[in-house]
Image (spheres, grey):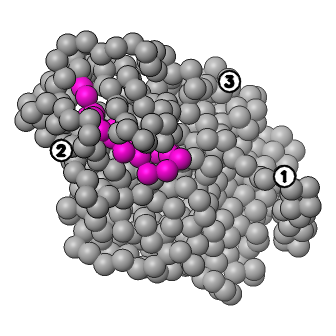
Amino acid sequence: MRRPVALRLQAALGTLALAAATGVALSMPEAAAAAGGATGYATQNGGTTGGAGGQTVRATTGTAIHEALCGRADSSTPITIEVEGTINHGNTSKVSGDSCNTAADKIELKQISNVTLVGVGNGAVFDQLGIHIRESSNIIIQNVTVRNVKKSGSPTSNGGDAIGMESDVRNVWVDHSTLEASGGESEGYDGLFDMKANTQYVTLSYSVLRNSGRGGLIGSSESDVSNGYVTFHHNLYENIDSRAPLLRGGTAHMYNNHYRGLTKSGINSRAGAKAKVDNNYFEDSKDVLGTFYTDAAGSWQVSGNIYDNVTWSEPGEDNNPAGPDPQSNTSVSIPYSYTLDDASCVPDVVSGTAGANKGLKVSDGTCTPQTPDPTDPTDPTDPTDPDPTDPPAGTNLSIGAGSDGSSKASGTSYGDVRDGDPSTYWSPAGTTGSVSVKWSSAVTVSKINIREAAGSEGTIGSYRVLNHDTGAVLASGSGAGVIGFPAVSLKKITFEITGASGTPRIAEFETYAG
């Protein structure tokens, strides 16, 4: 059951103290860039693709995230922002621009669209700093940790919500993330995952929500019933008082979630809401489903759930628990396809997939965590990685093409990578960045050759090769040289340096059809 706040804090501090005393770094595995596709209700209403097809940039501060948003051509220009490191109040400032509307005390995704925010490298931690989505659409948040966001005390951020959505938000997919607090409202915290004021078509998948008084809500009051069409699947709710979630109006689908240590109530369907609750595992908890703290009833459809050591309160005027023998009292039609894991294996499959820095593993209904697609940047055995000694053949298609990229170092040019002259080169403004080759009409490419300038050989570390038209990752690995991948027709191909031992210098970005 739920531990007192003091004990939870003591345990966390003890872990950190042990690491410090022993000199052991609490490291996290290399994380993938945005991978997989949206699921659940986020696939509806035109789908959720985030920043696919746009530029990819790296950010290690909150200010850099805001700068990336503000540096776009307009507020709907697609962008993927890869985040690594700890984002906090000290490194997050307001940035102004025509394509953004940011604030200093939160990561602000306001009045924008087509954005992916994904944790990479050793992990992305938003420490005491919430993510605020307002008047926005087509947003993906993946592989991040958001912790200890407060609405009172110091410092405060985002109204106390780890991730909060409000005011005409559409199509958001939050995936493989960890949202956590260190207590409830009396300790200054609010909800972990809140949706208000006409927020629709949202999916929360493969995520962990824990150690909070409030898991999250859909609708801020009994009159705020314009929200809904939300899917929750393969998530862990652990050590939560209530709101797992609280649903006011609208429709929600909960399947294959593991609920453990809910001390007051769990799925609270109120004010005409409908909840479809399939193949979940409820454990060591109280009142995991029903209408609570109101006489404005909601409803539910249940199937395949397991109730392991679940207790139920007596019905009352403002209390209508679904148990001890939950039965359906409504019918909910689901417009998308999905595959259910058996409820008996949900604790194991969720343990192996849910949360940040889990390698973006998923389940396909076989009760076994599945590794990401082999083109995922985290897969060291990617079959598209070439033999670096394999010489390119045919015509270098980069000659006579166009080029652009991320910020370049002083005195260098994007065109230097396609001029056939190995004595000229492009460098990023820092150690990471991207450069692209582009054509006016589609060409077929299956191999590129990255040649480093003399004196800089071996500087390039990790990389990704992107189909800039779609955002698809064609190949990934480390070091320069020949890179092969299945033939693809495109107008623009991007070589993105995600890690380096110094400032890279690319003399030539050659492209070949075969």
Q: Position of residue 8 (x, y in %)?
A: 85, 65
Q: Residues within 10 Å of mark 3 (few under 14, many from 20)?
A: some
Residue 131 magenta-highlighted:
no
Disc 1 marks which residue?
24
Q: Residue type at mark 3?
A: Cys
Q: Position of residue 200 (x, y in %)?
A: 38, 56
The residue at the point 35 percent across, 39 percent down is 453
Q: Residue type at mark 2?
A: Gly
Spatial distance from mark 1 to mark 3, Cα to Cα? 33 Å
Disc 2 marks which residue?
415
Q: Residues within 10 Å of mark 2 (few under 14, many from 20)?
A: many
Q: Is residue 441 visible?
A: yes
| In the rendered image, the vertical position of residue 324 relative to residue 314, given as above or below | above
Quick one: label 3 or label 2, which is nearer the N terminus?
A: 3
Q: Position of residue 478 (x, y in %)?
A: 50, 33
The residue at the point 32 percent across, 75 percent down is 101
| In the rendered image, the vertical position of residue 214 relative to residue 382, given as above or below | below
Asked where in the image residue 3 lies, by quadrant, the reply is bottom right
Q: Which residues are magenta?
A: 491-511
Quick one: label 1 or label 3, which is nearer the N terminus?
A: 1
